[in-house]
Image (spheres, coloured by chain):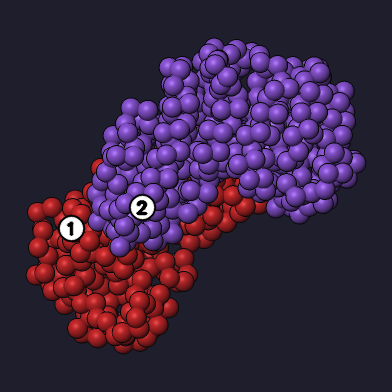
Amino acid sequence: MIGTIKGLTNNQLEDIGCQIILGNTYHLALRPGADLIDELGGLHKLMNWKRALLTDSGGFQMVSLLHLADITEKGVTFQSPVDGKRMLLTPEESIQIQNKIGADIIMALDDVVKTTTIGPRVEEAMYRTLRWIDRCLAAHQKPAVQNLFGIVQGGLDPVLRDICLRGLVERNLPGYAIGGLSGGEDKDSFWRVVAQCTAALPEDKPRYVMGVGYPLDIVVCSALGADMYDCVYPTRTARFGTALIPEGVLKLKHKVMASDERPIDPTCSCMVCKNYTRAYIHCLVTKDAMGSQLLSYHNLSYMMRLSRDLHTSIVEGRFPQFVQGFLRAQFPKGDVPKWVCNAMEVAGIDISACCAPLTSSQN
Amino acid sequence: MRFVVTKACGGGGRARAGSLYVGCCPTPIETPCLLLSTRKGLPTFVSPDLLASLPSPESRLLHVSPLHFLECPSPRTISNIGGLHRMLGLHECIFVAAPRDSIESLPESEGTNKLGPSFETPCGRRLVKPKEYMDMISSLKPNLWASLADEVPAWVSEKRNKTSVDRTLRWLDDCLALDLESGANTLGAIVGGSCVEERKRCATEVAMRNVSGFWIGGFGLGEGMEERPALLNAVTDGLPEKKLRQISGLTLPEEVLQGVAAGIDLFESTYIYHLTLGGFALTFPLDIVERDILHSQLSDTGSDCTKINLRATVYRKDTTPIVENCSCFTCQNHTRAYINHLLNVHEMLAQILLEIHNTHHYLAFFHSIRKAIKGGKFDLFHQRFMEGRRAYVTSAVGCS
């Protein structure tokens, strides 16, 4: 976020159970600027957010948003969006900016390549990421209050991933992110990388899969042993009029919603589902600010509820049942994607009951 | 619905304080009061859970335009859901329905004909006939509703103006004939443009109908501030003391005071909306009678001390709230610097926070009006307020 989650206030976020917010270093460094944030006492103070914050390194936006972004050993060279000048983001500077913003968790600057990249570039990026983590660690001025996470790279190559994993684990970091995914790779490759990483990362440290994502992806990654996720999907899809529900998605823009008197999700207890019908939300979406606000509120509530349910089901020893219930709701005809079946097998979760088409005797 | 005048100014003054009792709202609304503008029944930016943080019951009085629902949901769906209160999840709010909202449902007098008034809406120009209008009213079930009016701008011919009064009276009778509550929740619409005689005629005629209050339209459409008091008085002179008077089109604090002085009880105003969109936050002092504005310190930024524009770079590092000691959610939780940042990055939270503060502040202004009336000091309040607004212009301090 850039100092706010799309239209929600802090107390609304607290109401729905949000514990940690991701701040976008690239955008915040542009406006209002890292020095100003520092002068005002850090991002927590600027926003008056009393819970946790996490900032990314700023590298990803630079590579994905900017023209002529070029990565060298020094850092990421890019064209400033403000005046077109050539600028350089080094690991040291990324950490310096994040120290000023003051988030509880900060991310190392990594050399991230598109998952669809093949060839020596992937290897170069992985080794550079390891060299840069040392520079990040050296530059980090507040290790006592800000936790620097390393990011595992290596593309889709298990050998490269393994080298990176070992290198990062050696450095005994407070937490680890699995990076370089969610960029267009096929799902079958995606889960295998996550599985390899979670197997190799320490049990007692958080594992953060960056850029994930869709509820189904989160359930699969959680089954594989991941703990943290970030994604713009819930709020972005809300602005297009799409609600997240146990069955998948609900497109509130559709004409058929104009007379649907049910709540978005009868099983959801958020303020929106308790008070509003699909028909009313339909007349707001894409036309009025309130529409995207209410849908963002519901979608974020949905994601918080999903996280809570995952957590509680694990604690109460009924995680497999939760997964089965989740998959049945999303795939009532039993057409669970193959990649999910494969991943669950490796995760040791039996979902055979959801995969076969339901016969009347099984109902 | 029950309305009681609790304090009349007397001594030639027409300002009055009153109490409005409506079934769904547990406490009476004290008048003069502001109606909050809504879009499709909800405030433009402030979601219902945040609306609850504004002072009650004043912030529970909402203006809704039935024309916002021209496209959807259909009257049938709205009826099935159970009307406005159910559809919006605002069971304790008081909804007053009137077609004109001065933002996106604007009277279009050239499109109007004998069959009904015409409005410019986001769905294009629409003519609304009494039958269609009453269908919407009966499905929406607002607490109060205004009848249809032919509102014309100040510069129309005498003949056109006279026609507007004739039509408005006829539509009132048409609406009443279709009204299942026989006028118990009806605010009879009064027009008459910039002609004192027509204003008087319309008011007197509407007063003869079986309505429970009056909706005064046709203001804020080109008449000058100087000619307004005579027109307002011409209307209120023809109305019974005991019935509720609501007005549309008096937006600014100065205009509201003109309305209060003429004996109006409820005000629709788009002031908060326009301030919020512009990035402005109200800061004018509310203790107008107590303090002596003319001699108090003026800010050195050359501002008019009534509002600040939070887009200004001077607020980049300002860690104070919009108004010190303001008890609204925005001032209790956030700083000018934060709102300045939100405006710079085009985040909707800026408008939400501004709408909360501006609503809180404007409602507090109405509260101070009521206090002045009850204390018998309204005329002094009015005079001091107007002097204070002009003080920055007339004072000797230059804006270098």
* Residue toward you, A186 or B353: B353
Q: Quadrant of the C terminus of chain B?
A: bottom left
Residue B226 is left or right of residue A341, and the answer is: right
Q: Residue at x 67, y 48 (%)?
A: B222
User: Neighbour class for label 1 at 10 Å: few (<14), some, many (≥20)?
Assistant: few
Residue A301 is left or right of residue A86, and the answer is: right
Q: Which mark is residue B241?
A: none
Q: Circle 1 marks a residue in which chain?
A: A
Q: Which residue is mark 2?
A: B303
Quadrant in the rendering for residue B131: top right
Quadrant in the rendering for residue A262: top right
The nearer-to-camera label among 1 and 2 is 2
Q: Residue at x 30, y 53 (%)?
A: B397
Please state the horizontal and vertical placement of residue B297, each as a whole percent of the image: 27, 43
Q: Residue at x 24, y 49 (%)?
A: B319
- Mark 2 residue type: Ser
User: Neighbour class for label 2 at 10 Å: few (<14), some, many (≥20)?
Assistant: few
Q: Circle 2 marks a residue in which chain?
A: B
Q: Which mark is residue A39?
A: 1
* Residue toward you, B208 or B86: B208
- In the figure, the shade used to draw chain A is red
- In the figure, the shade used to draw chain B is purple
| 3D distance between C-alphas at marks 1 and 2 | 27 Å
